[in-house]
Image (cartoon, helix red, strand yellow):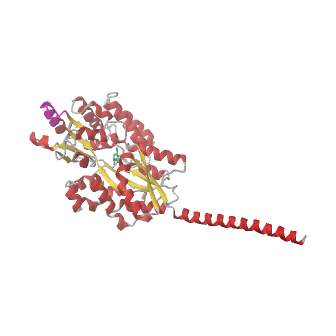
Amino acid sequence: MFDSQIGKWRLHFRRFRWYGVAVCCALVILGLNSIAVSQQPITIKVLMSALEATQWQPLVEKFEAQNPDIDLEIIEGPNATNLVEDLYTSSFLLGNSPYDLVYMDIVWTPKFAAAGWLMELSDRISEAQSQDFLAGDLNGGRYQGELYRIPFRSDAGMLYYRQDLLSAAERKPPETTEELIEISQELQAENKIDWGYVWQGKQYEGLAAMFVEILKGFGGFWIDPNTQEVGLDRPEAIAAVSFLRETIESGISPSGVTTYQEEETRRFFQNGKALFLRNWPYVWALANAEDSPVKGKIGLKPMVYAPGHESAACQGGWGLGISKTTQHPDEAWRVIEFITSAATQKKFILETGYVPSRRSLFTDQEIVAKYGHYPQLLEVQESSVLRPPIAQYAQASDILQRYLSAALTDRMTPEKAMAGAATETRNLLGR
Ligand code: GLC
């Protein structure tokens, strides 16, 4: 009896021992797992155009090698800026945005900041650290005095021309819109070139960016951000639209320009089919690449303007903000510090031909050795025109794009289109 009691205890003990071993093993596994989890890199996600996502790869590799605790994940989006903006916008509106960083076009800042989608960054960067950034680029990252976006690369619209053809015809590159038309027609008539001028005429953000240059070049304005006055139905604006229409009607621009974005116009020019091109500085490196038919044959200058007025470049550019919903603001900031640093910008610029947001890099020896026109570019950058920095920018731009497109494709007269654009814009602004 006593023996059988002892036997039961032994059995219990043996069972208990196996339970104990199992529990201990489970604890050890859990412990190891949690160590592994805590050592797992934190993923920082950011969305950008497919074109730039590819160009960022070497930067991502370098960043991850230096920061093994962070995985920088780039998500590829469409190439048109407004489409990328729509993706970010819907992710924020739906809540729980998957993006930790927001790679932002300069024109998005007021909207994203006003909507409360971005973290304030002023405390993360000192006055001295911000000194090197171009003023226009840094200011384009502010909203109501607060900083939300650190500039990575700047942009300004300019005019490319075929230096070889102009020299052969003993012509200087054009200063005015009239000269541009005249030289184009002359060389087209002599069969030196198929087309005179290509520009971005599709209904998208690039159309608005291109238009502000022509508009300012005709002495006009879009929206005055201080008074909210709208200038789209003024004679200067109508003259600007009429000039663009004239390029198509006079046969210097193919009617297809009304469907072209930056890349279509670049390929057109790069394939030797046009004398002049309006585009951003990134074109320089591509058009001068080994396999480019126009390598070494092109020049670049500030945009043409109407006689009696001044040249204007549209201020473009991209920078990084931190999403308000991220769980990892400090890691996101480490990415910003790395990407916007002078060393990273320099590497990126030497590889891609984009424009830095840091003043010092425009005169950097290695950069100037590769891109001799950068010191001159700095002047263009510093006198560029900002699109209206207002919270309703996306809607204002959409209105302008729709009416411009109607005028350019001959569905409305320039007067009627611009009257419509002005009225809708005033309604939007509550004027
Ligand atoms: C470039 C500019 C950007 C502009 C866009 C228009 O990416 O940097 O500011 O909005 O072109 O297509």
Give coordinates of residue 287: x percent, y percent: 23, 45
Give coordinates of residue 133: x percent, y percent: 32, 60
| Extreme residue toward the top, this view | 411
Q: Which residues are magenta?
A: 183-194
Quadrant of the rendered image containing residue 187: top left
Residue 143 makes an appearance in the image: no
Q: The N terminus is located in which quarter? A: bottom right
Q: Nearer the viewer, residue 24 or 98?
A: 24
**Is residue 219 inside the magenta stretch?**
no
Report the residue at 28% width, 54% height from top.
351
Report the residue at 33% width, 60% height from top.
344
Give coordinates of residue 282: x percent, y percent: 28, 49
Above or below: residue 177 compared with residue 64: above
Give coordinates of residue 76: x percent, y percent: 42, 47
User: Left or right of 90: which side holds 223?
Assistant: left
Report the residue at 61% width, 64% height from top.
29
Q: Nearer the viewer, residue 143 or 69?
A: 69
Quadrant of the rendered image containing residue 207: top left
User: Left or right of 249: which side holds 403?
Assistant: right
